[in-house]
Image (cartoon, rainbow, N blue to C red):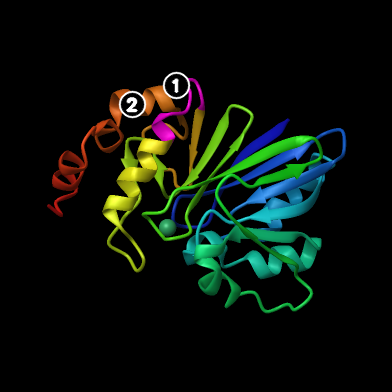
Amino acid sequence: MFFRQVHVGPMQNFSYIIGDKNSKEAVVVDAGWEADKLIEIAKKENLQIKKIILTHSHYDHIQKVDELASKTNAEVYFHEDDYNEIKSIIKNPNIKIHKLKNNDEIYVGKIKIKVIHTPGHTPGAICLLAGNKLITGDTLFVNAIGRTDLAGGDSLKLFESLQKLKKLDDKIEVYPGHDYGDIPFSTIGGEKKANPYFKCESKEQFLSLLGVF
Ligand SMILES: [Fe+2]
């Protein structure tokens, strides 16, 4: 499996490219900035971008999706609960859109990408599991979590979503939507040890740490 974490734009965002070297197909995760940079990387690896998956509806993760999908003919996937916000910025009527639900599977060649619905940062926020790598969008960062005070945010739902992620194996690698930590990626086990929000075992403790309870 080809896997690349790519720094894009002025807000410390990460996009990701996952590729199957046999079928020469690739998926891009999040398209907030620098569509051409992502296209160039795929091209150098002899991969064709066939699909774009968006972790959630915030502009710094989606604003280049129309450009990237139009230039590559890729189909676009995102969770149904963030549908309206994302649909409104896709202008090209030829772009094919797929609505996702929890537990859906998306294939790039033979590589399976599993969708885990993790609402809280936005209603339709998702994490994506490919092999031992979990792309967490703005749900879970290295030593931090996504904000819940923006439109559609919900602290209690984010707490429940984090409990879902805690059930994954400690060795699973965590690849966030922003480079906010002291290292660019981590593991579920590492976050259980060091991330004060991920460590919380009760919702009361979590909400008081967030200062909303
Ligand atoms: Fe966000």
Q: Which residue is drawn at 36% across and 54% down?
A: 120
The reply to whether dot 2 and dot 1 touch (C-beta < 8 Å) is: yes
> What residue is pinned by disc 2?
192
Q: Label 2 amino acid? A: Lys
Q: Is residue 23 above or below residue 37?
A: above
Q: Does the magenta stretch include residue 170?
A: yes
Q: Residue at x 74, y 35 (%)?
A: 111
How far from the left and from the top, in percent, is residue 76? 69, 61
* Left or right placement of residue 40 versus residue 115 in this view: right
Q: What stretch is highlighted in magenta?
A: 165-172
Q: Within 10 angstroms of label 1, few (less than 14), some, or many (20 or more) residues?
A: some
Q: Is residue 133 magenta?
A: no
Q: In this view, does 167 lie above or below 62?
A: above
How far from the left and from the top, in percent, is residue 207? 18, 47
* Left or right placement of residue 133 versus residue 95 in this view: left
Q: In this view, does 212 lie above or below 182?
A: below
